[in-house]
Amino acid sequence: MVITSAPGKVILFGEHAVVYGEPALAGAIERRVYVEMEEGRRDGLTISSEGVEDGDEYALRYLRKAVEVALVHLGADRDRGLEVRVASHIPMASGLGSSAAVSVATILAVSRLLGAELSGEALAGLGHQVELQVQEAASPTDTLTSALGGVLYIEPGRGYKRIAASLPLVVGCTGDPRATKEMVRGVRDLRDRYPRIVDPLIKSIGEVTREAKVCLEERRDIGELMNINHGLLEALGVGTKGLSHLVHAARAAGASGAKITGAGGGGSMIAYAPREVERVVRAIEGLGCTAFQVSIAVEGARVEKKGLL
Ligand code: PMV
């Protein structure tokens, strides 16, 4: 039997623009998906899940596809009998990278069970394939961050750079479900209708992300840049009333910046709160939403020593 885990993520800067080749900055968070896997007594997959009820079918599509991609990659019989238990400590379908974490933890589990060693990059690459097959459009951001951990500056097609940063972040979840695929399609349609307006917005998000990288490296406050990024995401049409409420409540409570994180249209926001963390959490909770402080997960996907399910 093998037990693996992989962290969720927050996109600090650059969501949506990264789909068009601009850079993104993302951080793995200490909220994980756990996968327990053993050889099955009969052919095919047997799955049981815990803590994934809300997005059950959604998450399990990634899990099934991840098993298939890993078995094919390793040259194994794709009908091999496997028993899988999965437990998630990441809210599902909320923009916190649960699907990438499910994919990456599952691929790692299959590879270890079959006695294979995959590098973090190979794991991320296979996880990306899973995301592409399940949701069509996907940048490598989520799977790379979940596989490798830490804070990453990602340039699609050109690689990534690790940024040493520990960030005082608060996550607020609206609880409104949304599908990344539809949000990505919405931005694409807007761009098709107004290319001369939307292209500069996408480029501006890229500039904000480049500037934020420098800020992080120089350990300067990134709050103001988060606010600008949020405004640009609103202009791309991925904001909602619920997200705006949380973003403004966080700023009013003392966060130096706040923005949508992930695809928008519901899901989650993040606040950068070097001071007043507790107040920011309470302000979001005061609006009836879930909020928590998160720390950056330095480790990405890993094999666990003992059962956590
Ligand atoms: O919904 P999330 O957190 O998986 O974020 C999607 C980020 C996008 O840039 C909108 C899409 C992508 O694949 O990068």
Image: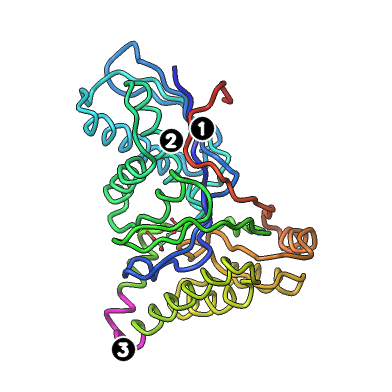
Q: Residue at x 56, y 60 (%)?
A: 268
The residue under label 3 is 196
Residue found at x 38% / y 25%: 112
In this rendering, the answer to whether 90 lies above or below 86 is below
Up-down: is 242 above or below 30?
below
Ranked by sequence position, the earlier of labels 1 and 3 is 1
Instruction: Please state the extent of the stretch shown in magenta in the rendering.
Output: 189-197
Q: Which mark is residue 249?
A: none
Q: CA distance from mark 2 to mark 1?
A: 7 Å
| Three-letter amino acid code at the position of disc 3 | Arg
Q: Position of residue 157 (x, y in %)?
A: 29, 61
Secondary structure, mark 3, is helix
Query: Looking at the rendered structure, which numbered label has been put on residue 105?
Result: 2
Residue at 48% x, 50% y: name it: 97
* Picture quarter with ligand 1: bottom left
Q: Is residue 309 left or right of residue 182?
A: right
